[in-house]
Image (spheres, rainbow, N blue to C red):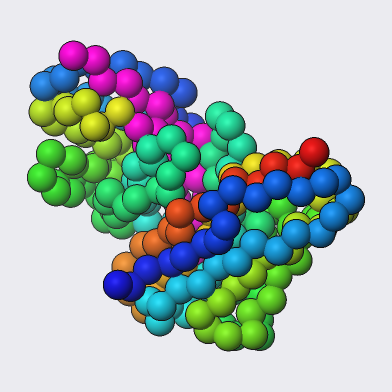
Amino acid sequence: DGGITQSPKYLFRKEGQNVTLSCEQNLNHDAMYWYRQDPGQGLRLIYYSQIVNDFQKGDIAEGYSVSREKKESFPLTVTSAQKNPTAFYLCASSDLAGSYEQYFGPGTRLTVT
Amino acid sequence: GQNIDQPTEMTATEGAIVQINCTYQTSGFNGLFWYQQHAGEAPTFLSYNVLDGLEEKGRFSSFLSRSKGYSYLLLKELQMKDSASYLCAVSSGGYNKLIFGAGTRLAVHP
């Protein structure tokens, strides 16, 4: 089955700790994206990557970091510098040569206390 | 600035038709997407419009007017499972960056 996987589904951390959210895709898509969703708000773009070893900041990159060492993988680290890390995090990928549709993973709900 | 507006909530009756509007102001335009999102789940793709006019796909249709910065999603023969949030998103700029509206929460009642 082709798709995007994110793990874990739920994640709990103490304030001051860094945490890494995984995102893997086997769709052979070039582009990958990380979004954050808060209650009553739309998805906001954190980081995106068009190609291996290259990534760009989105609208709310402060307090986050990413890497793109493999085409299939785009992990997101939520650092202790992120002031309000509790949120629903969604990873997506798209084929830039196609219809531009973004396919989403199931999401990780991060709670920091 | 970039802005996408859609109503916060709507209610409708099972079997009826509902239209969800979306207006946008963006610095570029490569196309407009509608996604469906059930609570706590990932958004799933519904439709994509890049040219003016109506795109029909089963019970769902989407309309675009680029000159007016306006789109709507039309849902026919509503079912209880259509209760979800509907997200309007505009592809703007390079890398297929999407700008999302806050979503419209639709409640379908018997």
Q: In the picture provided, is B106 more to the left or to the right than B61?
A: right
Q: At 64% across and 85% down in the image, what residue appears?
A: A69
Closer to the camera in the image, B66 or A61: A61
Closer to the camera in the image, A4 or B91: A4
Q: Which residues are magenta?
A: B84-110
Q: Is residue A76 above or below residue B1?
A: below
State the image quarter where residue A99 is shown.
Answer: bottom left
Closer to the camera in the image, B39 or B23: B39
Residue A46 seen anywhere in this rendered image of the structure: yes
Assign the N terminus of chain A to one quadrant of the image. bottom left
Based on the picture, tell me whether residue B102 belongs to the magenta stretch: yes
Q: At 45% across and 59% down in the image, what residue appears?
A: A105
Q: Is residue A34 above or below residue A71?
A: above
State the image quarter where residue A103 is shown.
Answer: bottom left
Q: In the picture provided, is A22 more to the left or to the right than B68?
A: right
The percent coordinates of residue A51 (x first, y second) are 56, 83
Q: Is residue A66 above or below residue B36?
A: below
